[in-house]
């Protein structure tokens, strides 16, 4: 029996080894046909996919940031919205958005490549990178999802879920792609030489302007302003989660900016990562200093937004500026963010996340900064635009950057305002007041994000029945 078992095991091992032996014989032949260009393309493709993964993971950062700055009764609606936006955005961008952005067409919009059809030549806006179309799409759809996520940071805790879904289709399918085509897809602003390496305008300013349009029509949360119009603090429920969101976004920016080379071989991805992170660190310091000067304390939320504002700002300039300039850009972004956030609050615009200040003003400052700090060497290496004003380039590039801000920001605001206005006149933008007071988790999704904290169970009568606890009250030692 032992010999028989040994014979069977030996036979099985030999059978299992046959594919490996065949592969070992064929491998040198396959490898022998590869060229350095093939290897370089494989490395470039792998880098683009990894970068796309980092950018996609930024959705987790947005989720944690929004959850942290929301009240407990609304956290379930936040994560539901994130998942829905990812699903809608990916499908819509695959169907039409990618073609409108990068497909061959005219100076305004792409007209070819719908449903990811066609060959490499179809997507003229990305002809400069040799990675497969599938990898190009995966990277660019992650960018579109980031811009879409920015829209909702200002509209938390009072917006109908249906509004998110309908606007996502229009934004991911048309509004964002048109701006992307103007700058990245061979459109009219790219012909002027506008410098927006990774999307301070295309991604962040677009998202912020759509957010501003929606927020103006939506109105502030109940209790945000007193009878005299003075802003009242509505604190988020979990600052550690908010900071975790900031850190996840920060890490995601390692794919966002360096990944925008859409290649690894022969590219300066290390230098771009360096300028990105120097700016982020400086942004934290700028916001912390402003917080201490104004309040005589260090506001953790402001510090986090300082990092985000700086990352937004350096996104346009990361491939064009020296490290010292990245620090200046990031620090000023943190200062601007703090100042604008206080101003926005005072004029009656309820922005729970500070997205208008961080992504909007950060995007504007970052886009302008390339017209100031872009070095001749880096401009020549990238082939975009002209050197900045401080390097003798004159006001030409600065003017192009300003033109792009006005054109793109204005277009997104007007079109988004029109869409939100139609939604307001038809299905309405806001949930009912009683639903807003009770929280969107139950009214919109039928489940609490923190059931243990917001539901008291009547154990004393043995019935096991549950009753929601109004926010701000305690029952049986459980606080909302």
Image (cartoon, grey):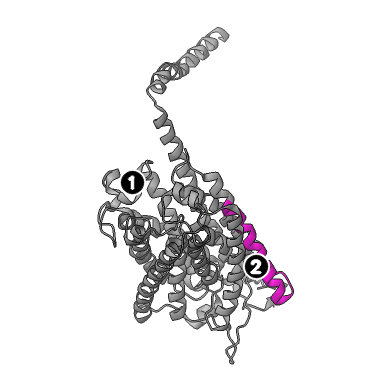
Residue of label 2: 287
Q: Residue at x 38, y 76 (%)?
A: 417
- Would you name the residue on which mark 1 appears? 127
Determine the residue located farthest toward the bottom in the rendered image.
228
Q: Nearer the viewer, residue 213 or 319?
A: 319
Give me the residue at 39% from left, 47% from top: 136
Q: Is residue 245 left or right of residue 393?
A: right
Tell me residue 361's x, y (percent): 52, 70
Q: What is the C-alpha distance between the residues marked 1 and 2?
A: 40 Å
| Foreground residue among 379 and 71 | 379
Secondary element at image label 2:
helix
Drawn side of residue 5 relative to residue 399, left or right: right
Quarter assignment of residue 183 = bottom left
Displayed quadrant of residue 345 = bottom right
Quadrant of the rendering where the N terminus is positioned = top right
Q: Is residue 284 magenta?
A: yes
Q: Residue 475, can we see it?
A: no
Residue at figure coordinates x 30%, y 49% from the top left: 123
Percent coordinates x, y for residue 385 in the rendering: 41, 56
Label 2 crowd bin: few (<14), some (14–19), many (20+), radius 10 Å: many
Span shown in magenta: 275-301
State whether residue 145 is above or below residue 302. above
């Amino acid at each position: 029996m032992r010999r028989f078992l040994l014979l069977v095991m030996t036979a099985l091992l030999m059978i299992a080894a046959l594919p490996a032996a065949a592969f070992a014989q064929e491998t040198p032949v396959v490898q022998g046909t590869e060229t350095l260009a093939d290897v370089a393309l494989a490395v470039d493709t792998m880098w683009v996919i990894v970068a796309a993964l980092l950018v996609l993971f930024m959705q987790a950062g947005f989720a944690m940031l929004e959850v942290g700055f929301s009240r407990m009764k609304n956290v379930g609606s936040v994560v539901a919205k994130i998942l829905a936006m990812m699903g809608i955005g990916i499908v819509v961008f695959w169907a039409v958005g990618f073609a409108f952005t990068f497909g061959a067409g005219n100076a305004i919009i792409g007209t070819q490549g719908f449903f990811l059809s066609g060959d490499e030549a179809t997507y003229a806006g990305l002809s400069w990178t040799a990675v497969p179309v599938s990898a190009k799409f995966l990277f660019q759809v992650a960018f579109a999802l980031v811009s879409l996520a920015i829209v909702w940071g200002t509209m938390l805790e009072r917006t109908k879920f249906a509004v998110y879904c309908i606007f996502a289709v229009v934004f991911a399918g048309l509004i964002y792609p048109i701006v992307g085509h103007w700058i990245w897809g061979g459109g009219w602003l790219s012909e002027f030489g506008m410098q927006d390496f990774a999307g301070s305008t295309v991604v962040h300013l677009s998202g912020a302007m759509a957010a501003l349009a929606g927020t103006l029509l939506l109105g502030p949360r109940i209790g945000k302003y007193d009878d005299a119009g003075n802003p009242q603090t509505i604190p988020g429920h979990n600052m550690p989660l908010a900071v975790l969101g900031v850190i996840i976004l920060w890490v995601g920016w390692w794919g966002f900016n360096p990944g925008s080379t859409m290649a690894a071989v022969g590219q300066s991805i290390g230098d771009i990562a360096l300028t990105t992170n120097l700016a982020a660190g400086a942004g934290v310091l700028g916001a912390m200093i402003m917080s201490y000067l104004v309040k005589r304390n260090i506001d953790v939320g402001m510090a986090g937004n300082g990092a985000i504002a700086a990352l937004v700002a350096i996104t346009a300039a990361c491939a064009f500026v020296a490290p010292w300039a990245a620090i200046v850009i990031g620090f000023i972004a943190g200062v601007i963010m703090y100042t604008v956030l206080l101003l926005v609050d005072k004029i009656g615009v309820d922005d729970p996340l500070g997205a208008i200040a961080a992504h909007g003003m950060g995007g504007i400052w970052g886009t302008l900064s390339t017209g100031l700090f872009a070095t001749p060497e880096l401009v020549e290496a990238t082939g975009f635009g002209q050197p900045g004003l401080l390097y003798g380039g004159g006001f030409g590039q600065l003017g192009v950057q300003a033109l792009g801000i006005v054109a793109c920001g204005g277009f997104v605001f007007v079109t988004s305002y029109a869409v939100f206005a139609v939604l307001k006149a038809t299905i309405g933008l806001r949930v009912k007041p009683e639903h807003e007071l009770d929280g969107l988790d139950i009214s919109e999704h039928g489940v609490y994000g923190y059931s243990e904290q917001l539901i008291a169970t009547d154990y004393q009568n043995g019935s096991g029945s549950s009753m929601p606890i109004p926010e701000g009250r305690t029952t049986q030692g459980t606080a909302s």
